[in-house]
Amino acid sequence: MFPKKLQRKLDNRKVDNAFRELGTPSNLVDFSSNDYLGFSKSENIFKIAHLFLVENNIKQNGATGSRLLSGNHNLYHLVETELCRFHNSKAALIFNSGYDANIGFFSSVPQRGDIIFYDELIHASIRDGISMSHAKSYKFKHNDLEELERKCQVERNRSPLETNIYIVTESVFSMDGDSPNLTKLSELCEKHQAYLVVDEAHSVGVFDNNRAGLIQQLKLEHDVFARIITFGKALGCHGAAILGDESLKQFLVNFSRSFIYTTALPPHSLATMYSAYKELSKTKKISKLQENIIFFKVEIAHKNLKNLFIESNSAIHCCIISGNEYVKTIAKKIQEKGFDVKPILSPTVPKGQERLRFCLHAFNSKKEISEVLQLLANFAVKFE
């Protein structure tokens, strides 16, 4: 018998039109995945990774244990060295996923008596990690550096410098697609002797003038205490890494439970990461992605949809359509026309902020972009 309390929660989700179900693969035009450059389906990356394993006589399917036991195979050193070179970082530590990285960092690094200030729209994995921390945590309004400044000033006036302040944001927010003013944020952290932590999951491999993320594009990599990068977006594979100095890496190896107590990634995952980074360093697909982002924004204006969209220069563009029922209905109508556009429902986003989330890719054609936005214009006007 299933517990009644749990069944009630499931039933409430259905009543609120917020019930989640696993989807099935489709042949729809992709406007929903994080595969911004199409690397996840790259035969070239697949072949290079396979050839690398064959040439190095690596015929092992699994890691056999955690990295602190038997799982720290030689590919870890190779890939972490490449990450340091590519991202201009002193040290890198690979985790099994972005979720594991954020849980591992925020549950272990901020200590009792420390303070965490986090953007109110920060990713759920960071919130979960913060909830496991012994530090006190407070949110600030999305990208509102004036409010954050006031909070830092109040905290510094009443706290000794032994109290560490951690400020947490994303370089591209996963549900809005927008970015904070990272330069001013870095200056604010320096002023208040705070440690800046930036999740760069949705910026690595997206911006043409620097493929390594917005932090490096702004030359702030040595002003940031920790960067979290993930490989499941533009890199098209799996895993994540935390970038910082060697002391941070040593601390995480010793105290991050999601690193210590999990089986390491298999050699094939590391070989794919390595091959994906080699491809990222030379690909021309980022320029095509940027062309599509610009074209998408032009088409939004042409079709009089700009007032519905959150301003974004990233690959993520969100159209606000309030109400789970309405946004699901419009998404279904667009899907029936052959385009995979997903609704984002509350409670994933606040009530009233439900949305269609358009993820752009290097492989989307201008014709597809124009057509999907015309469908949105046709359907959305009926629900205004």
Image (cartoon, rainbow, N blue to C red):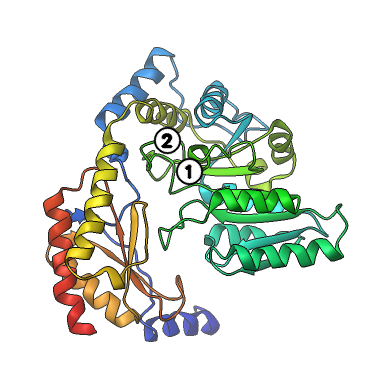
Residue at 16 percent across and 62 percent down: it is 372
Which structural element holds mark 1? helix
Residue at 43 percent across and 58 percent down: it is 178
CB contact under 8 Å: marks 2 and 1: yes
- Residue 202, above or below 241: below
Local crowd size for mark 1, using a 10 Å CA cut-off: few (<14), some (14–19), many (≥20): many
**x then y, percent, for residue 269:** 44, 33
**x then y, percent, for residue 353:** 40, 76
Q: Which residue is mark 2?
A: 210
Q: Name which quarter of the figure residue 112 lies in.
A: bottom right
- Residue 235, above or below 359: above
Residue type highlighted by circle 2:
Asn
- Residue 253, above or below 313: above
Residue type highlighted by circle 1:
Leu
Local crowd size for mark 2, using a 10 Å CA cut-off: few (<14), some (14–19), many (≥20): some
Which structural element holds mark 2? loop
Instruction: Please indicate, yes or no, whether residue 170 appears anywhere in the rendered image.
Output: yes
**x then y, percent, for residue 196:** 65, 49
Seen from the viewer's position, the closer of residues 175 and 62 is 175
Q: Which residue is mark 1?
A: 214
**x then y, percent, for residue 3:** 53, 80
Q: Is residue 283 left or right of residue 168?
A: left
